[in-house]
Image (cartoon, helix red, strand yellow):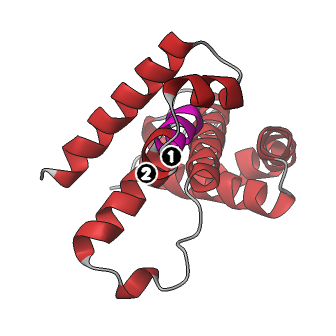
Amino acid sequence: MAEPADATRPTIDDVFAREYGPLCRLAVSLVDDPGRAEELVQDCFARALPRWEQLDNPGGYLRRGVVNAARSELRKRRIRRRTPNPPEGFAQLPERDRQLLDAVARLSPRRRIAVTLRVLEDRSEAETAELMGCSLGTVKSLTSRGLDDLRKVVTR
């Protein structure tokens, strides 16, 4: 025999009707894209559904889920912006060269600039420091750490 439903416990339909709009506004304010914000909110409701009966505070659970999903979305955007589109002919390069170019693209912008100026353009540390507007020690550090990062990928 099925247990009677808890009359004080809100159904997912009730919470959806009450929280969907505010959660979408929250998500839009975090990700600046209404379509993507709505998807994040819908995903949170979908993830909540299987465990609905165990949730003590469904609105709080959903709100936290939206914030976490927005943070994840913003993190992915930052990574996509840091990783440029592959150059033309990239697919025809040997695998090792493609790995190296991918690794260079994943370097922080300052390390990538320092390594490019020092190694690819064969500039001196002083020229690189002047072009980057930083100290000689900073160029040495950025170049050294950037090359260390690249060695980890190339020596695999």
**Where 152 falls versus 127 (above or below)?**
below
Q: Is residue 147 left or right of residue 117?
A: left
Amino acid, disc 1: Thr
Comparing marks 2 and 1, which lies closer to the viewer? 1
Tell me how far mark 2 sits from mark 1, CA to CA.
9 Å
Residue 136 part of the magenta-drawn span: no
The region drawn magenta spans 109-117
Q: Are marks 2 and 1 in contact (CB under 8 Å)?
A: yes
Q: Is residue 59 left or right of residue 32?
A: left
Q: Quadrant of residue 85?
A: bottom right
**Front one among 102 and 115:** 115
Residue 113 part of the magenta-drawn span: yes
At horizontal 59% and vertical 49% (from top left) the residue drawn is 82
How far from the left and from the top, in percent, is residue 101? 40, 61
Residue where numbered disc 2 is placed? 104
At horizontal 61% and vertical 23% (from top left) the residue drawn is 129
Check residue 116 in the rendering and tell me which mark sits there, or answer none.
1
Q: Secondary structure at mark 1?
A: helix
**Where 36 falls versus 65 (above or below)?**
below
Q: Quadrant of the N terminus?
A: bottom left
How far from the left and from the top, in percent, is residue 123? 53, 39
**Where 90 falls versus 102 (above or below)?**
below
**Front one among 140 and 61:** 140
Secondary structure mostly taken by the magenta-highlighted segment of the chain? helix
Q: Dot 1 surroundings within 10 Å: few (below 14), some, or many (20 or more)?
A: some
Amino acid, disc 2: Val
